[in-house]
Image (cartoon, rainbow, N blue to C red):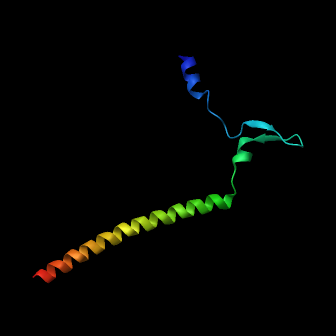
């Protein structure tokens, strides 16, 4: 049973695993290579938040337009 549980985690990789050394002898970790600038992350998160707000407001706007269109049509018919 223990071997089965090890099989599941055998392919796991930590971002802090050393993958080599640089010219000065310092260890290079995977996170050093894959890391991004903090501004890029903040910009992506901000964009995602703004997109969700736009989609939510578009749904509300669509409902309002449908409501008023139906209301106007009823008034015209009477």
| Quadrant in the picture for residue 18 | top right
Percent position of residue 57, x then y = 40, 69
Give residue 22's position: percent from left, percent from top.
85, 42
In the drawing, does residue 49 fall left or right of residue 39? left
- Tell me the quarter of the picture where residue 55 sits: bottom left
| Residue depicted at x 71% and y 39% | 16
Residue furthest right as drawn? 24
Q: Position of residue 69 (x, y in %)?
A: 24, 76
What residue lies at 24% left-to-right and 73% top-to-bottom? 67
| Residue at the (63%, 58%) spot, across then down | 41
- Count of numbered circles on the image: 0
Q: Is residue 31 above or below residue 6?
A: below
> Where on the picture, by quarter, is residue 42?
bottom right
Q: Is residue 25 above or below residue 69?
A: above
Q: Residue furthest left?
A: 78
**Residue 12 horizontal side relative to residue 71, left or right:** right
Please give left or right for residue 44 compared with residue 61 in the image.
Answer: right
At 56% from the left and 63% from the top, the residue drawn is 46
Quarter containing the C terminus: bottom left
């Amino acid at each position: 049973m223990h071997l089965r549980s090890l099989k599941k985690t055998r392919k796991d990789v930590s971002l802090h695993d050393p993958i080599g050394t640089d010219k000065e002898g310092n260890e290079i970790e995977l996170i050093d290579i894959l890391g991004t600038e903090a501004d890029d992350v903040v910009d992506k998160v901000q964009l995602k938040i703004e997109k969700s707000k736009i989609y939510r407001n578009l749904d509300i706007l669509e409902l309002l337009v449908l409501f008023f269109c139906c209301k106007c049509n009823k008034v015209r018919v009477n």
